[in-house]
Amino acid sequence: MEKAEYSPKEMNQMKWQVYSQLPQLEQNILVRYQEVKENGIPWEENVQAELVTIADVLCNCALLFAVPSKLQEKCGQIRKALERKLRETEEQGAILENLFETMELLEEYIGQRAKKCNACNSDVFFTPILAGYESTRKRCGFLYWNADFQLESKENYGCPVCGAYDRDRLMIAFLEEVRAEGNEKLRMLHVAPSPAIERYALGRDDILYESTDLMLEGVTFQADLQHMDMVADATYDIIVCSHVLEHVENDAKAMRELRRILKPDGVCLVLVPLIVGKRDTEEQWGCSIEENWRRFGQGDHSRLYGKEDFIRRLQDAGFYVNELGKDWFGEAFYQEYGFDDLSIMYVATKEIKLVEQEEENFGLELAKLRQENKLLRQALNNLNDQLSGLRKSAGNDFAILFHAQDNLGYEISDRKFQENLWYPKIMSAEDTFREIIENKKSIARFGDGEFGIIFGEQRWRFQGKNEKLAERLKEALQSKQENILIGLNDFYGDLSTWTKRAADGVRIYLTPEIRKKHYELLDRDRAYACANISRNETPEGVKRQKQIWEGRDCVFIEGFQTRMGVGNDLFDNAKSIVRILCPAENAFDRYEDIYNEALKQPKDRLMLIALGPTASVLAYDLALQGYQAIDIGHADLSYEWMLRGNHNRVPQKYSNEAPEGYLVEEICDETYESQIIADFH
């Protein structure tokens, strides 16, 4: 199933449409099963086509709902089995049983996630919390990066229809029970307003809604929560103050102000980020954004409350604190509307007690201690992981030192010593460009990754070990075709022009044993091309590179989400562009499909291939068929990095070299979409 750019609302609608089909499809399978298994009537060809369609729905469903990998594999296996001609009723019955069982598993998995949003009354599949929160917390060293927060659901976080967060939805559920009597109006103050709560309150005839914020424009009045002098005592029936106090330096003063302006019988909904099991509060003002992420789990927070301390501070301000969870709202409500045991909110009151405070007893204290102990163990494990990473980093530094010693003889400039060494002959980048541009030669490039696959090693996450790919790479590397350049990385000798990081990487990789393996595959008398023509790190390099496709009709054969040229002008001088999209990972698994699709293109088109090690084989094979094929590699990403001045992740493009480069944002680009002529991802 192809991914496209859909809004959360559209994606939710699509999910419900697919989910609603499943019962009917299940019934169709039962009918076919009765015919085959009970009546002994083998199905006809049209029935097999129908079952293939059902299997396709299952496969798409598995992707759409991101079901566990084992269930995804099960759907794929059924689809593959149905590609064969199944004539025996016993075999047909078995596949129908498997299909029905898989359908039931899918229905159960998806059904558990089918919910309603109490804020907009829509049928929904809630969206999870952004993965960036956890990854950023982990990267910055936050000790509780994978801990559970109250009312920060990892699975049922946002409503795809109205956008309400789980904390908004639970507050709305509580406010539904707070009603004015007769023709009275409830006066409500919303501190640092959120759209969902504001929309709900404005829709209530019995609420007079006001909002305030220190900086935000468009509110009823701007004010510092620590100094609300413009508001009279006992003004509001309802106050909503959600995820604000962690930003306020003197929270005790802010809490006292909240109590002062609340009516005696009013309710103040006060929420802050709380980690399950954490008792103590940590706070520090004036830290950098990075340090705030490390200490408090978010860049603009300066305090991380412990639950018991948070409650104590509210009590010190004179509030009675009501802790409302499943017992208050009801288990059936929690189940239907996507809440869980961590969906707990706090309502502060002046005189009214909504719930009686539980008496402390041994059982309750024991449960709290167990929660806290679990959190401490988790934090300790995270700290140990960080220490392990530091040890590994130190170990790498020592390894670099020893490998540099091994490589010293090849880097030394003494000519007498060099006479005893052998280096592959590698053309200059300029000569390589000349062969490609003027003589229309193709190029297949080989770096440490391609050699690693030939040697049966796992070098990359995006391409696993593959014996067939290893054989084809070796064939291409040792071919003698005049119209095909074989490009090598020039890392066998002097590394003085390399960056320190890149040179250290070479020293780690190119041990005497690995160098020997390379040399066994290479020809002493051959002139190899420069593989680094794919890296455009200077404006001059870009200008030379663009001459390759100047005025040419181009076919981009690229990984899904590689998106060469999207968002930049690298290929603006090409005459035309069409794209064949391939899997971002393990592209060689679809090699025959990709190759046959490429052969449909006219011979005068320039093939530009960005497909990892598969590109080397494909460039070689297409050149044998008379095409000019360029294994272009990271040309587009190198250009992006040159423009940005760093090697960070490009959010809209897949990268195997940048940290978390496999996390790719969706795009909406009509030109790009119109260029896609085939999609095998």
Image: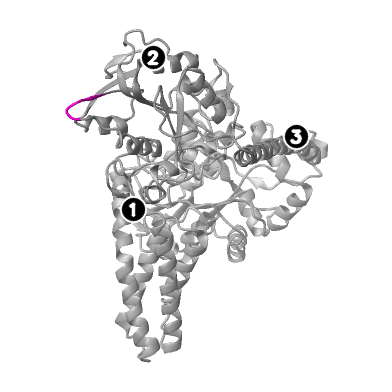
How would you rate the neighbour count of disc 1 (Cα within 10 Å): few for under 14, some for 14-19, many for 20 or more?
Answer: some
Q: Is residue 495 above or below residue 677?
A: above
Residue 636 position by quadrant: top left
* Residue 470, image quadrant: bottom right
Residues marked 3 and 1 touching at CB (< 8 Å): no
Residue 612 percent location from the top left of the image: 53, 52
Residue 184 painted magenta: yes
Q: Amino acid at mark 2?
A: Arg
- Tell which circle, 2 or 1, labels the residue nearer the N-terminal end: 2
Q: Which residue is mark 3?
A: 394
Instruction: Give the left or right position of residue 638, taking residue 281 as reference.
Output: left
Kindly identify the amino acid type of the residue bearing the numbered disc 3.
Answer: Ala
Going from N to C along the chain, the mark reached first, 3 or 1, is: 3
Q: Residue at x 35, y 75 (%)?
A: 51
- Label 2 and label 1: CA atoms lie apart by 63 Å
| On-image quarter of the N terminus | bottom left
Q: Nearer the viewer, residue 674 or 379?
A: 379
- Between discs 2 and 3, the one toward the N terminus: 2
Crowding near pointer 3: few (<14 within 10 Å), some, many (20+)? few
| Callout 2–callout 1 Cβ contact below 8 Å | no
| Amino acid on which disc 1 is placed | Ile
Q: In which quadrant will I find the C terminus?
A: bottom left
Residue named by callout 1: 676
Q: Residues within 10 Å of mark 2 (few under 14, many from 20)?
A: many
Q: Residue tagged by mark 2?
A: 260
Name the outermost residue toward the top. Answer: 229
Magenta-tinted stretch: 182-186
> CA separation, marks 2 and 3?
56 Å
Percent x, y of residue 572: 35, 39
Provide residue 637's location: percent of width, then percent of height.
48, 39
How far apart are the alpha carbons under marks 3 and 1?
Answer: 46 Å
